């Protein structure tokens, strides 16, 4: 007999940890990828502060995750791919699955590739991340197989760096152009790229076109999100 209380838990909302943008009342979608979501802004987590790895944010993210669980969240994700640097602090604070960003997939993706293939990683701001991918890749041999580029010159990044962040709608065309340029630069510089990871949570909408352009697998925020939720469902079916 199946435990229906557990089934109900997996149908509950996923909690999204959001950057502090100066607009706490900004309306956000109530679903993501067909699942209910709830949000918690992390005090002090301005985009630049996260990029700079300000030490007080580890506790702030853990506390925000606890608030989400107290509100009924059955899993934790994030609104910024750089939140992976707080993965361990958050996971230690709550007893629900935590998947803060697509960079967490990097070790698995690398090990699926042929030995000489490289992993291309496209991020929002490439000047604040190395081939260790914020501590996700520790093995020097695996780090040597990572190539990073980004879209730091885009309108998206410019807007996110403001305090408060910009509120005017941004043209997708600008983000897509910068993202496509970054992918093409990586392909030109690293002819043996076997797959890509897109860090930014704004990138998944562009992934289908770039998969077609490159002919390569692209893992992104939605990939990581779906793996977490599908794993929860499989655990309950055992």
Image (cartoon, rainbow, N blue to C red):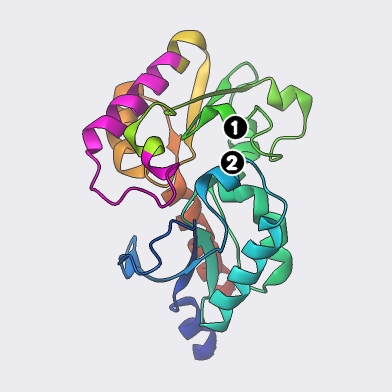
Say which mark, if any, is on residue 128. Answer: 1
- Give whichever of discs 2 and 1 has the lower sequence position: 2
Q: Position of residue 112 (x, y in %)?
A: 60, 33
Please, is residue 33 above or below residue 162 in the view? below
Say which mark, if any, is on residue 51. Answer: 2
129 or 223, nearer to the observer = 129
Please, is residue 235 above or below residue 214 in the view? below
The range drawn in magenta is 159-185
Residue 109: in magenta span: no
102 or 41, nearer to the observer = 41
Q: Position of residue 230 (x, y in %)?
A: 49, 62
Q: Say whether residue 226 is left or right of residue 175.
A: right
Residue 102 visible? The answer is no
Residue 163: in magenta span: yes
Q: Position of residue 62 (x, y in %)?
A: 66, 66
77 or 163, nearer to the observer = 163
Q: Quadrant of the C terminus?
A: bottom right
Q: Residue at x 64, y 21 (%)?
A: 145
Q: Quadrant of residue 146?
A: top right
Please, is residue 153 above or below residue 70 in the view? above
Disc 2 versus disc 1: distance between alpha carbons?
6 Å
Q: Quadrant of the N terminus?
A: bottom right
Q: Say whether residue 173 is left or right of residue 50.
A: left
Please, is residue 228 above or below residue 38 in the view? above
Q: How many marks?
A: 2
| Marks 2,1: beta carbons within 8 A | yes
């Amino acid at each position: 007999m199946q435990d229906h209380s557990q089934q109900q838990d997996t149908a509950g909302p996923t909690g999204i940890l959001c950057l502090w943008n100066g607009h706490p009342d900004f309306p956000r979608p109530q679903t993501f990828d067909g699942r209910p979501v709830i949000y918690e802004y992390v005090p002090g987590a301005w985009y630049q502060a996260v990029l700079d790895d300000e030490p007080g944010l580890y506790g702030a993210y853990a506390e925000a995750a606890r608030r989400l669980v107290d509100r009924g969240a059955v899993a934790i994700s994030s609104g910024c791919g750089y939140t992976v640097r707080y993965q361990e602090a958050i996971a230690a604070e709550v007893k629900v699955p935590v998947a803060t960003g697509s960079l967490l997939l990097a070790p698995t993706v690398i090990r699926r590739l042929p030995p000489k293939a490289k992993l291309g990683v496209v991020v929002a701001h490439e000047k604040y991340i190395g081939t260790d991918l914020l501590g996700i890749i520790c093995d020097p041999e695996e780090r040597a197989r990572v190539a990073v580029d980004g879209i730091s010159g885009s309108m998206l990044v410019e807007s996110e760096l403001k305090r408060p962040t910009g509120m005017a709608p941004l043209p997708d065309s600008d983000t897509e152009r910068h993202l496509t340029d970054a992918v093409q630069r990586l392909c030109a510089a690293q002819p043996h790229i076997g797959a890509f990871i897109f860090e930014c949570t704004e990138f998944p909408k562009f992934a289908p076109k770039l998969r077609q352009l490159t002919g390569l697998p692209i893992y992104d925020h939605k990939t990581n999100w779906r793996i977490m939720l599908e794993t929860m469902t499989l655990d309950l079916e055992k």
